[in-house]
Amino acid sequence: MKIRNTCFALLFWTSLLSSSITCAQITGSGTTDFIPLWTSTKALGDSAIFQTGEKVGIGTMRPDARLNVVTTSTTTGAITGNANATSGYAPGVFGTTASSTEYAAAVYGLATAGTGITFGVYGVSNSPNGTAVQGYAPSTGTGSTNGVAGYTNNGGNGVLGAASATTGVNFGVQGISVSSGGVGVQGSSPNVAVAGFNQVCSTTCNLVAGTAGQFVTASGGIVLQGLVGAGFTQVFSVDSNGDLTITGKLTKGSGSFKIDHPLDPSNKYLSHSFVESPDMMNIYNGVVVLDSKGGASVNLPDYFQALNSDFRYQLTAIGAPGPNLYIAEEISGNRFKIAGGKPGARVSWQVTGVRQDAYAKAHRIQVEEDKPEQQKGHYLHPELFGATEKEAIGSNAAPAMTPPGRAAATSEANLR
């Protein structure tokens, strides 16, 4: 009506001025609550924008937010934000929230599909130095903030990082903390807090040679440390000198030392196997010269009897037979006596003892034991018994991962 009244007013004034004017007649029809759209130069119709109260919907007549955009297209996104500036701070999409309510979000993404590889939030960066998704929590107050947090309610991953490049130094997940009391990466779980796998995944995941876990310290200190309990008691540590400290029992399949070969240190290694025993045994030895009566008293460390019990002896004459050598007095006062030899003869002796200290008494090694029920029928080294990898103790199915290359193959155009 306003347009027609304006046209009538123009016709009135032009008739007074003996002029002529032609008024365009606007026609058309529409649906209540739809924002009108020029369907031609002279007609109006419904647009895709629907408004009810203060809520606006695009592609929906039931908006559940101030702005609700819905699309059923398989090739375009519901909303695309583009910042074409080549410098400066220019977000493609920017969201803020002032709410302190739990789970309030400045930007929230929800993938509702019940199957398939879907993403609640997906980020792509084409820059060789870019970041696809970044989280930043700048608060300096008390409390615990998270730059990025991920959660899952099934057997998937709370946070998944995949480095698809097959060359160069790259990281599936990298954690950095500049605080002297901070932690670069932390895992918390009633089962396995942090796990590392060497594998390449396409349709299935195959284990490959490499390093499952790597820890580096650049300026001394502890390379790896294990803490347990509410008081964070140390159970093991590896320092920058390569020294390993364990407060409990070490269980191994075999053991040896490996050093540069003394006769050819630049070209060869020399290895010796550890000495094994079913007992928690200590070994002491030495060489003694017999006195004028063909005997000798051998002094042991002052802690010997406090540490050891169940003693065993060996005597070997050096240079000439000593068939009458014997232990004249057993260990007492941390010493024992040898007799029956030739005056001035040299005798090699060896004494063993079983540990009797408080820790050893509380943690005796069980020489033979049944495997737990869940490990029966499985092996530490299944290949040695003609068994398969599935019969290995501790074997787990590889975690589900996004196939390498998927992220790289998905471009910005795929999301429009």
Image (spheres, rainbow, N blue to C red):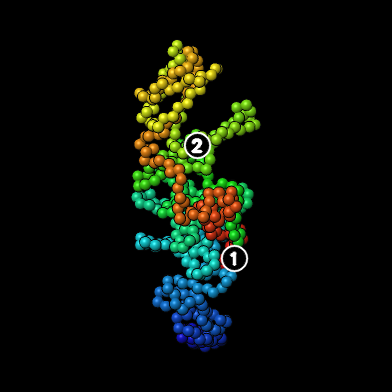
Q: Name the mark on residue 291.
A: none
What amino acid type is highlighted by mark number 2? Glu
Instruction: Identify the residue shown where x is 41% and y is 30%.
Output: 311
Is 38 on the left-hand or right-hand side of 311?
right
Question: Above or below — where is 57 with respect to 328?
Answer: below
Residue bearing the label numbered 1: 414
Q: Position of residue 114 (x, y in %)?
A: 50, 69
- Taking the image as drawn, is residue 344 in sight? yes
Please give the count of numbered marks on the rendered protein.
Answer: 2
Tell me the quarter of the image containing the C terminus.
Answer: bottom right
Instruction: Identify the residue shown where x is 53% and y is 59%.
Output: 400
Q: Residue furthest front?
A: 324
Q: Position of residue 356 (x, y in %)?
A: 37, 34
Of pointers 2 and 1, the one earlier in the residue sequence: 2
Q: Secondary structure at mark 1?
A: helix
What amino acid type is highlighted by mark number 1? Asn
Residue bearing the label numbered 2: 276
Q: Secondary structure at mark 2?
A: loop
Is 244 on the left-hand or right-hand side of 39?
left
